[in-house]
């Protein structure tokens, strides 16, 4: 079968590989669409970083070294059920929660498997991936999506990231939320917040991304922080009270500073983006004297079913966030290069195998 194999920095090859076999307790899926995400871009641009294995060091759970099949944001159709699998039928539309966990560490035992000490991702750490013609996955990770279109279903994984962050932050209906950064996760954060009844202010430097936030209706107010005083806008919109909650979806220190400035007393800042550089914080001024909370979230745990319902019910419309569709043979030039060179105009590029 055909698969996109990740060999390392700027080295992705579409090759013929052996088709995986169904085992007891597993499901064979034919992937339909696979989204390219920020993690994939980091792997392509910077080379293998954990949880990706290297050519010499295998991942502790998959036991695989490079190359591995890519793709962790994907939808597909069930083709075969392994012995003992129930709750699914051949032909079902599904998405995969692309995790590999040990099930025995304290986080897993506590139900917080997104914090597993040996965490890995299908499509990054091994065990196949969505950029292949077939994949075999443990039943635990397979979620039916009913009549949700398969292209939209490919966005359930990043939607689950956004949903987990909103729940982790304790955001409530009637509150005002500020989202810093309108990339894919920032836009989906805004969409979830709107669906849960919050007033949403989005701050973003890019004109194209601001327009996407405005056109999709996920933001009540859109701010260009290069030309507007974000804190002043928030004060005006909240009659001086400040925001109840803010989300960092940019991963840049200056955005964190801006978001702390917009919070009202007792507000919460939730870090969702991955920061690659240290950030210096005046704890007393920014948190203590305002009785504020600062937290962070990663991935998802038991969030996929709710994310699927948000999309199926129409509470979140995923269609506008799909900005490109390509086939796997064009993944480098029309996928990775496009997202690197023209990222301001792209949200999610979907890849199909044919």
Image (spheres, grey):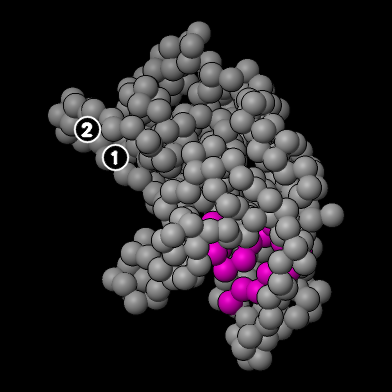
Please check the rendered image and state whether residue 7 is part of the magenta-colored stretch, yes or no: no
The circle on residue 294 is 1
In the rendered image, residue 329, in percent from the top left (x then y), is placed at 78, 47
Residue drawn at x 54%, y 48% is 8
Name the image quarter holding the N terminus. bottom right
The answer for how far apart the CA atoms under marks 2 and 1 are is 8 Å
Residue 151 in the image, given as x and y percentages of width and height? 76, 52
59 versus 91 height, above or below: above
Residue 66 position in % (x across, y down): 53, 58
Q: Does the magenta stretch include residue 132?
A: yes
Residue depicted at x 69% and y 32%: 338
Residue closer to the observer: 23 or 224? 23
Q: Can residue 312 be seen in this view?
A: no
Q: Quadrant of the C terminus?
A: bottom right
Q: Main SS type for the magenta part? A: loop
Q: Which of 61 and 25 is in front in this view?
A: 61
Q: Quadrant of residue 9?
A: top right
The tag on residue 287 is 2
Question: Which stretch is magenta?
Answer: 122-138
Labelled pair 2, 1 in contact (Cβ < 8 Å): yes
How packed mark 2 is, by other alpha carbons closer than 10 Å (few <14, some 14-19, many 20 or more), is many
Residue in view at x 58 percent, y 60 percent: 68
Kindly tell me whether residue 3 is visible in this rendering.
Answer: yes
Q: 192 left or right of 253?
A: right
The local crowd at label 1, few if under 14, some if 14 to 19, many if 20 or more residues have their Cα within 10 Å, is some
């Amino acid at each position: 079968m055909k698969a996109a194999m990740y060999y390392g920095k700027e080295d992705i090859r579409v090759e013929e590989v052996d088709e995986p076999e169904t085992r007891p307790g597993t499901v064979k899926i034919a992937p339909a669409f696979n989204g390219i995400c920020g993690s994939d871009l980091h792997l392509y641009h910077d080379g293998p970083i954990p949880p990706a294995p290297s050519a010499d060091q295998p991942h502790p759970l998959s036991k695989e070294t490079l190359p591995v099949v890519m793709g962790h944001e994907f939808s597909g159709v069930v083709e075969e059920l392994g012995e003992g699998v129930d709750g699914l039928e051949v032909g079902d539309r599904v998405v995969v929660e692309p995790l590999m966990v040990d099930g025995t560490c304290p986080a897993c035992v506590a139900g917080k498997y997104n914090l597993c000490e040996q965490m890995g991702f299908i499509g990054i750490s091994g065990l196949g991936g969505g950029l292949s013609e077939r994949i075999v996955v443990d039943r635990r990770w397979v979620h039916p999506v009913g009549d949700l279109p398969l292209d939209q279903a490919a966005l359930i994984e990043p939607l689950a990231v956004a949903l987990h962050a909103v729940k982790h932050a304790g955001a409530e209906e009637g509150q005002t939320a500020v989202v810093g950064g309108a990339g894919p996760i920032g836009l989906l954060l805004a969409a979830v917040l709107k669906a849960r009844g919050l007033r949403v202010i989005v701050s973003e430097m890019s004109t194209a991304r601001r327009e996407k936030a405005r056109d999709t209706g996920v933001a009540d107010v859109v701010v260009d922080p290069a030309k507007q005083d974000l804190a002043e806008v928030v004060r005006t919109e909240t009659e001086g009270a400040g925001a109840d909650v803010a989300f960092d979806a940019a991963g840049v220190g200056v955005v964190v500073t801006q978001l702390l400035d917009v919070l009202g007393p007792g507000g919460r800042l939730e870090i969702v983006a991955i920061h690659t550089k240290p950030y210096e914080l005046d704890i007393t001024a920014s948190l203590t004297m305002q009785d504020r909370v600062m937290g962070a979230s990663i991935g998802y745990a038991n969030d996929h079913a709710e994310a699927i319902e948000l999309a199926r019910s129409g509470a979140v419309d995923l269609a506008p966030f799909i900005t490109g569709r390509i086939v796997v043979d064009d993944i480098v030039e029309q996928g990775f290069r496009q997202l690197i060179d023209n990222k301001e105009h792209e949200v999610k590029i979907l890849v199909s195998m044919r």
